[in-house]
Amino acid sequence: MSAPAQFQPKPDVPAWRLLVTLGLAGALAGFVLVFVYQATLPTIERNRAERLAAAIQEVLKAPDHYDTLYVYQGTLTRQLPADADPKKLEQIYFGYHADSSPIGFAIASGEPGFQDVVRLIFGYDHATQTLLGMKVLESKETPGLGDKIEKNVDFVSQFDGVQTPLTGVKPRQSTGDPHEVDMITGATISSRTVIKIINNALQRMGPMLESYQAAATGPQSAEVAQ
Amino acid sequence: MSKTSPQQDFFRGIWRENPVLIQMLGLCPALAVSNTLENSLVMGIATFFVLTGSSLLVSIVKKAVPGEVRISTYILIIATFVTVADMTLEALVPDIHKALGAFVALIVVNCMILGRQEAFASKNPVGRSLLDAFGTGFGFIIAMVMMGSIREILGTGALLGMKVIPGPFEPWVIFILPPGGFLTLGFWLLLFGWIEKRRVERARVREWPHGVGAREEAA
């Protein structure tokens, strides 16, 4: 029985060594992360911008060009005062045909869905109160069920030409009302979320869109009148 | 600790001690993001990168780290590699990064990785720790591919987006939903359990060709 006799407790490691080890490891980790963050950030931001630009093309049906509008102090504006940070403001987009006639607004908005926040962008012609298209930007809805809101072509294509405000109906119960959207069986909550996002965004933005469109098309119609 | 050969260090993680199929570690990502082959592969490669990176680093600094703070230091090292992997995936493959969601960040708490640091890299030389990490990492990738391909084929009728089941096929949607993950893993574990049982039985037959009690009966 020599083992217990030979056992000697290890001398205590001084506290400063523990602190230095952890502090050093933390500092090195931070150092590495700052570099990787700076190296990957431009690509990540470019990817996001590309995805958004592609979505705008889709929901405004390939506009010739579009303006970025900022929601600033309750109105939509194209020119921001110098002290406002464009990255912190909500942005919507206003697209034009090649002959500069307006197509409509592209509005991005989000609300909680079945699992997490669903973010989508939709094209909207305010003059006729009609949707032009809808594309989901971010969602973590159930694969195979809830994610049909972005993958089911029949569901997505309904958002082209439907009148606002939208009402969701069960499949095969539609009455031919131009406000109706057929919801997806098995994805009721996700379908309802999409409808809710669009209705709420339009309710929130409606007056701003009204005054912007009046101002934007105002001079043009005046020219026509002359 | 008995010495093992370099081959043993490497192949142990792939087959005899496969992290998912035998040790049943790292099951959370194996169940959650194995719904398509593409997602499984990217998850496997990200985990492989984190595992080899942290095994290398832990093995290098093992003598300098006092035992009292070793777990927190290892976690810090692992978390750094995970964040690097997370940012790189977001920059390179944004769509897959979106599909993997929170599970890339959750590699930090994958007990398979911390397990290899604590059980191997913190006690062994750098070269052997790397071999061990390669083996375990490959074992994880293989298990992820086995899960992902079965689930994608049965759940969508396609593999890597290409149709593989000819003719009209109604996808078994349940296989890309969470229950499909449990079912697929269950069948794989059943198969591996059966193979292991047969191996043990054969070894016993070699040792006692006439049954365990045969010699006493003869005597």
Image (cartoon, rainbow, N blue to C red):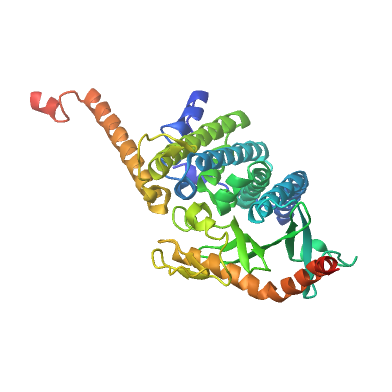
Q: In this view, does A24 lie above or below A140?
A: above
Direction front: furthest residue: A226
Q: State the quadrant of the C terminus of chain A.
A: bottom right
Q: Where is residue A118 shown, x and y percent of the image?
A: 58, 62
How many marks the image carries: the answer is: 0
Residue B93 showing in the rendered view: yes
Q: In front here: B188 or B153? A: B153
Identity of the residue drawn at 66% across and 64% down: A125
Q: Is residue B184 left or right of residue A129?
A: left
Q: In this view, does A15 lie to the left or right of A5?
A: right
Q: In front here: B61 or B92? A: B92
Identity of the residue drawn at 54% across and 67% down: A195
Residue B3 showing in the rendered view: no
Q: In front here: A217 or A119? A: A217
Q: Is residue B45 left or right of residue B139?
A: right
Q: In this view, does B110 lie to the left or right of B79?
A: left
